[in-house]
Image (cartoon, rainbow, N blue to C red):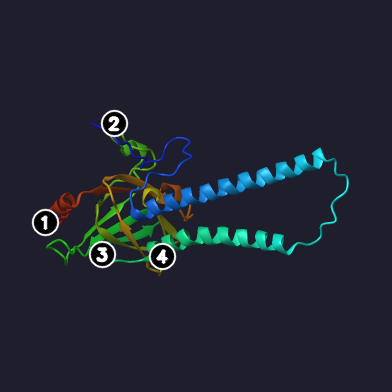
Amino acid sequence: MIFIIQCDSPALWQTYLSDPASITMEGILIFNKHLLFLLTVIVIFVAWLLLYTIYYFVEYNNKFSSKFVHSKELEIVWTSIPALILLILSTPSFTLLYAMDEISEPELTLKILGHQWFWSYEISEFNSCQKQDQSLKYVCYMMVLDGLPTTKQGYFRLLETNKRVILPTNTHLRLLVSAADVLHSWTIPSFGLKVDACPGRLNQVNLFIKRIGVFFGQCSEICGVNHGFMPIVIVSLPTTQFHHYIMTKLELN
């Protein structure tokens, strides 16, 4: 049996990105590797050119510069190569940018409202459920250390909330983000999402979660004295289990 451990929560002295849990984050990681490869090639080439120039100068003991003042061919080369590099970088960048902004037909809508200093959620438009005209509302705020279970094993300090947002996997989701007071930012690194929550403005973004897991995030916009105490916890479940959860919650309400 093979166990795959995913990085969905912060780690001590973390210098790497979280493992992707959405199509958007997968595209970001692919573009990041693409960009790092090109930067590595450019740095190696420039370093080699610099060292070769120093060696050539020392080898032949050139005390005076050459009377080399103009070359049309050289100007074409050092103009066309950067333009080609920018073109190579822009192609996947624009593809990813437009893919992130594309909104498909959602099967579920999650409404997110930022407050000082907690998040409120409303899940509605259950297109694949029978109760389409009902909604599920709840408020999530950070749990203090005393509010965690006695053992505190498996819980993260300053990242746990009193309620966790339950979302389905392999489902097109629409997120509507706004704020009730000041600027906030709803951010989940594993999803590759950072959506600004602005008072009086409704921001929309799509989300497609590819695997089950527990994902953590925080408010990423300075919003007051307790800005660092607005955690976000998302739990993704298979679609069938999510539908059972929704039907049970709506019947209890």
Disc 2 secondary structure class: loop
Q: Considering depth in this image, is 212 or 95 the residue closer to the camera?
A: 95
Number of residue marks: 4
Q: Earlier in the sequence, mark 4 or mark 3?
A: 4
Q: Earlier in the sequence, mark 2 or mark 1?
A: 2
Contact check, label 3 and label 1, Cβ < 8 Å: no
Q: Which residue is mark 1?
A: 251
Mark 2 or 3: in front is 3
x and y percentages locating residue 178 in the rendered image: 37, 64
Q: Quadrant of the N terminus?
A: top left
Q: Which residue is mark 2?
A: 150
Q: Which residue is mark 3?
A: 106
- The reply to whether residue 180 is in sight is no
Of all residues, the one furthest to the right in this rendering is 63
Residue drawn at (77%, 42%) of the image = 56
Q: Earlier in the sequence, mark 4 or mark 1?
A: 4
Disc 1 secondary structure class: helix
Disc 3 secondary structure class: loop
Q: Residue 98's mark?
A: 4
Q: Is residue 253 left or right of residue 93?
A: left
Q: Earlier in the sequence, mark 2 or mark 3?
A: 3
